[in-house]
Amino acid sequence: MATILKTKNVFLTGGACGLGKGFTDSLLAAAARVIFTDVNRTAAEATEKEFQDKYGKDNVKFIECDVTDGPKFEETFQTAISFLGHVDLMVNNAGMMVESKWERMIDVNYKGVVRGTLMAVEHMRQDKGGKGGRIINISSEAGLKEMIFMPIYGGTKHAVRCFTSCLATAPDVKAQGIEYGTLCPGPVDTDLIRNLDETKIRHSNLMQPERLKERTSSVERLQEAFMKLVLLEEMNKAILYVDSKEENFYEMKANNLGPTWPADSTDLSSQ
Ligand SMILES: NC(=O)C1=CN([C@@H]2O[C@H](COP(=O)(O)OP(=O)(O)OC[C@H]3O[C@@H](n4cnc5c(N)ncnc54)[C@H](O)[C@@H]3O)[C@@H](O)[C@H]2O)C=CC1
Ligand SMILES: CCCCCC(=O)CC\C=C/C=C/C=C/[C@@H](O)[C@@H](O)CCCC(=O)O
């Protein structure tokens, strides 16, 4: 892939499977170097081997780390900086959807993203001697709308979107030299939505599996959307909603107080 990346040194959470694995694949194909973390060591080691064989041993490395473990996350991030020189793209992707494990879910989906973001900001900020960079946080369609099946999951994803947007619109954002973007996918065919039951969502008896199947995007489609975000000349404030019902990607139109997709870019499908 003859892609020119502005950000080549990447730290990504939850890269063993699903979307995180897909994003890592696309970044490596675009000549990035990626450190990814996960809690699932078996799956992550298999992914690491697959990508090292495909892209070279020095370009991708797995470090086992749970995003809810603050000291370990900090140590892992410092190891990544030593390995890469510096991190210029942070992707806070690790997440879960199990409504019955709601405290853990808040810890992973929201506190993990906040922790990863704040750590990256301290490392990147130009006004404190850093080199600048980009931070992409993975929210969801459930972070834009109220979905009765997932009130707590949706709460964490609303929080991720709001948090990221606040940082993107803060008065010191230019001085920091950091750009903030949010990806909001609709349902995607990964382990997170396979085998849905009453422990993972509420009102599972109302869920129409066939309707959901119709609405589910492939990981490849999300890889394409993610790379559109990564390759934007200016990314700050971008909120990319990937509606699986439609052909195209859409700008975010959820409110008129916060940020929107960068001006004049309403449909990314032709870019
Ligand atoms: N699949 C979907 O329909 C959608 C997913 N998302 C979000 O995309 C992100 C990725 O989800 P998927 O790939 O679908 O799920 P997945 O379950 O396939 O992959 C999630 C990965 O994160 C890892 N992980 C979970 N907890 C962790 C922790 N505490 N520390 C480090 N790693 C951890 C898992 O081991 C797994 O490898 C999540 O934030 C999810 O909420 C957003 C919208 C739709
Ligand atoms: C249940 C999917 C959870 C995926 C987790 C996410 O982050 C994505 C959440 C976004 C959308 C979920 C949509 C769920 C749709 C189903 O309820 C479907 O069965 C109903 C479809 C109704 C319609 O399309 O009008």
Image (cartoon, grey):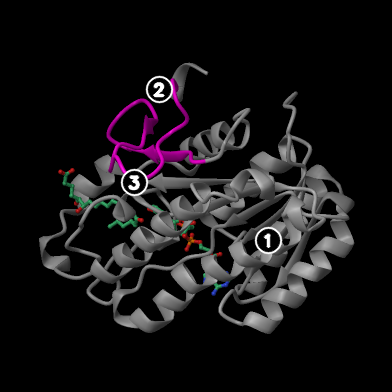
Q: For the view shown, which residue lies furthest in the top direction? A: 270
Mark 2 surroundings within 10 Å by alpha-carbon count, few (fewer than 14), some (14 through 19), many (20 or more): few
Q: Going from the N terminus, do you reach mark 3 or mark 2 first?
A: 3
Helix, strand or loop at mark 2? loop
Residue under the point 86% across and 47% down: 56
Q: Going from the N terminus, do you reach mark 1 or mark 2 first?
A: 1
Front of the two marks 1 and 3: 1
The image quadrant that residue 81 belongs to is bottom right
Of 48 and 130, nearer the camera is 130
Q: Position of residue 232 (x, y in %)?
A: 59, 30
Residue under the point 48% across and 44% down: 219
Amino acid type shown at disc 3 = Gly
Badge number at residue 267: 2
Q: Position of residue 211 (x, y in %)?
A: 19, 46
Is residue 31 left or right of 197 when viewed as pictured? right
Q: Which residue is mark 1?
A: 120
Of 242 and 173, nearer the camera is 173
Is residue 195 left or right of 222 when viewed as pictured? left
Badge number at residue 186: 3
State yes or no: Cβ of the residue under disc 3 lies below 8 Å from any atom of ligand 2: yes
Q: Going from the N terminus, do you reach mark 1 or mark 3 first?
A: 1
Residue under the point 68% across and 50% down: 176
Helix, strand or loop at mark 3? loop
Residue under the point 16% across and 62% down: 148
Magenta highlight range: 237-266
Note whether 25 is above or below 155 in the view shown: above
Tell me, yes or no, whether the highlighted magenta stretch contains residue 224. Answer: no
